[in-house]
Image (tube, helix red, strand yellow):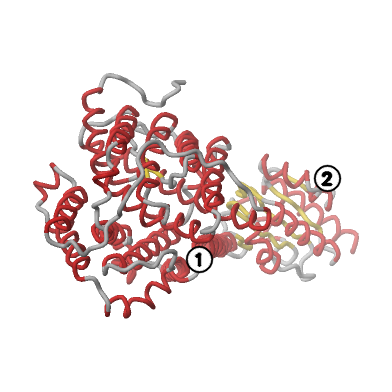
Amino acid sequence: MKIVHGLTFDNIRGDIFGGLTAAVVALPLALAFGVASGAGPMAGLYGAIILGFFAALFGGTPSQISGPTGPMTVVMAVIIANYIDQPALAFTVVIMGGAFQVMFGMLRLGRYINLVPFPVISGFMSGIGCIIIALQLAPMLGQSHPGAGVVASLMALPGDIAIANWHAVGIAGMTLAIVYLTPKKIQRLVPTPLIALIVGTVAVWMFFSGAPVLGEIPTGFPKLQMPALDWVVLTDMVGSALVLALLGSIDSLLTSLVADGITRTHHESDRELFGQGIGNMLAGLFGAIPGAGATMRTVVNVRAGGKTPISGVVHALVLLAIVMGLGPLAAHIPYAVLAGILIKVGIDIIDWGYLKRMHGAPRAGVIIMLVVLGLTVFVDLIVAVSVGIVAASLLFVKRMSDLQLENVRSGSDGLPYDAAEQEILDRHADDIMIYHISGPMNFGAAKGMVKQIAVSTDFKVLILDLTDVTFIDTSASMAIENIMINAAEQGLQVILIGLQARVKETLNRLGVTKVIPADHTFDTRLDALVYTAGLLEQAARKED
């Protein structure tokens, strides 16, 4: 196995050009995400450099470009606000989140992370987009509310409008006009965020000198941030780290799927999680904000010719070279330009595709999506993800249990019997009750199965046909046992038919098959019916 997945020097020219182009796109976004997180513009840039470099080296998607993203930035802003007086704790959370991602990769959990239901992802991402927009309204108006949440920002909006800095409003309006109205021919040559950054900075210098700017920015390599722990808030730190890890993993793997579609290749999910985790751990160690695979930057990289991890490394090294001399220039960048760029990012993150389809989508999915969206914006990111996953899981279990119970059919439900089987059933119609169960059976259907399989003294023999049961869990196994015990207590003979190897192993391990005599278990339905007929005829002769 190669140390660097997908590494080849056959495409060196395309990789260099792709990495250079991706760096140009990443520069204004990294600055904007750094400011939005509350950690500062350089924290965003170093997040792009460190994560971009190490995720490319250790990740499992050759053409992917990684760096700060909108969703990760929103979570990081909450973390920084929670530990505003102890910044070391905030970056320790980043390190812990990266460690969780490494663990996800080593435990090969990549396939399971992709199982998060779409309505949950849609609601969460749309909520993130709304948060980004809401938090950038004040900077767009030339105001600042450090650490303020969505509700506080919205409540302060009327006052911000009353004292708006119209120089900042003009710059923000110009930025939005550039990112939305620039002709596509120009966009193919130069990314609109970079155009807005340059034009906005020049405009402040020449025409809008009253707009707030970033001011003095330190240059050089970042300082090492030693991890710190506070046992009082350790549980909260672990919870926030898990949200970072889950969100970063989902974000990255979704981008990996996009990259696969464009390049017609296949990424390694678990390796990608490992690489993202290494990158985020090191980002936190140097006081940089975390990130994930960035869809737009990855697409730009591939279209510009990047195909291997070399493009991701080049992207990081170009940003590093820029950082070394960027401080004096970045000091003149207006906050309003970054706010305008982020508002565009927020609008793009909102899942407009699902919102347009809501009228025709299943109602339960729509409700889950709206609940997750509302909780994300107005309550808490962790609560939103937790409630969404739990609600979607319960809904799935309910639907599966309903389907499973539909597969519990009695002998009168038109089951296909051959002539010999039908003859026995017709002859002993008043004495035999047969139930045919099919498909996988789990805890969701256990209680309903006990209710549905009616045990009645009107019959003398209960036959449970499990020939088509492919899987059974502990709850369903115990339900089968309860049915058999209840039948035996009422004087019925109980017969089991057609236990597949895996089902038989589960029932044997739990001791369920010991409830009935060993000779009451058969491989085929005909054998069971012949035996049952013999039992009934023998009992009839004794009565006579």
Residue for point 40% across, 64% down: 127
Quarter of the rendering occupied by the C terminus: bottom right
Q: Earlier in the sequence, mark 1 or mark 2?
A: 1
Instruction: Give the SS element for disc 1.
Output: loop
> Where does label 2 land, which residue?
518
- Judged left or right of residue 488, residue 88 is left
Residue 98 in the image, given as x and y percentages of width and height: 52, 42
Q: Is residue 30 above or below residue 312?
A: below
Q: Name the amino acid type tagged 2.
A: Ala
Residue type at mark 1?
Answer: Asp
The residue lying toward the viewer, choosing from 111 and 406, is 111
Q: Which marked residue is nearer to the observer: mark 1 or mark 2?
A: 1
- 2 left or right of 518? left
- Residue drawn at x 37%, y 47% is 44
Residue at disc 2, secondary structure:
helix
Q: Nearer the viewer, residue 200 or 119?
A: 200
Query: Residue at the spot x=46%, y=48% of the render?
Result: 114
Residue 523 position in % (x across, y down) = 69, 43
Residue 490: percent from left, percent from top: 84, 67
- Quadrant of residue 424 within the rendered picture: bottom right
Q: Residues within 10 Å of mark 1 (few under 14, many from 20)?
A: some
Which residue position holds label 1?
A: 380
Comparing 415 with 106, the one in front is: 106
Q: Please indicate whether residue 544 sits to the left or right of residue 438 in the image.
A: right
Q: Is residue 44 above or below residue 262?
A: below
Position of 202 relative to 258 (above/below): below
Residue at the image position 47 percent from the left and 21 percent from the top: 1
Is 507 positioned to the left or the right of 190 in the image? right
How far is mark 1 from mark 2, CA to CA? 56 Å
- Is residue 440 visible from the viewing direction of this image? yes
Q: Residues within 10 Å of mark 2 (few under 14, many from 20)?
A: few
Q: Nearer the viewer, residue 47 or 225?
A: 225
